[in-house]
Image: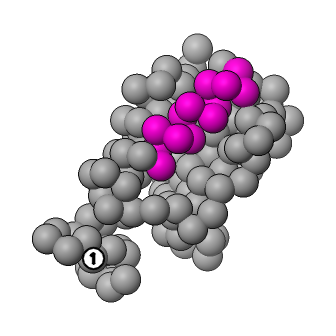
Amino acid sequence: MAKVIMNGRPRRRRETGDRTIDTLEAARIAYAACAEKRATDIRILEVQGLTIVADYFVICTASSSVNAKAIADEVRDQLKLRGKRTPIGVEGRESGWWVLVDFGDLIVHVFQADAREYYGIDETWADARVVEQSEAA
């Protein structure tokens, strides 16, 4: 993985054979995948500088555990297909209450509504810049 400078800030890029995809582009692919599977209240948060674990979070709400699993699977499939990226880890898929898909510089959080409220993720990362968001259900 190489670092490049975009808009005066370093961004990670992952080499993908015939082209390079940056982290924000990967986040936008994940956002679209969430929307495709009918997730609600989808947000891309820039967390670079607030945490060392990732540059971006994509956060969304699923209507059920089955929907959460489908969203996480779609994110994984689309990033593999369009971004030549595979997750380094997936947590919580079995229960579907909170599924975390970790791509290193990008982490996708798929919550059921009660899990999102319980963990207060939106309040926890209130200082993060919102790059893109959908309307809440």
Residue extent of the magenta highlight: 64-76
Q: Residue at x 58, y 14 (%)?
A: 137
What is the three-letter code of the residue carrying label 1?
Glu
Whether 69 is among the magenta residues is yes
Q: Residue at x 66, y 51 (%)?
A: 100
Q: Position of residue 90 (x, y in %)?
A: 65, 56
Q: Position of residue 56 (x, y in %)?
A: 49, 59
Seen as rendered, the residue at the extreme left is 18
Q: Is residue 76 left or right of residue 66?
A: left
Q: Which of the image's four quarters has the N terminus?
A: bottom left
For mark 1, give the secondary structure. Answer: strand
Q: Residue at x 37, y 55 (%)?
A: 80
* Residue placed under numbered mark 1 in the picture: 15
The residue closer to the viewer here, 54 or 83, is 83
Is most of the magenta stretch helix, strand or loop?
helix
From this viewpoint, is residue 66 visible? yes
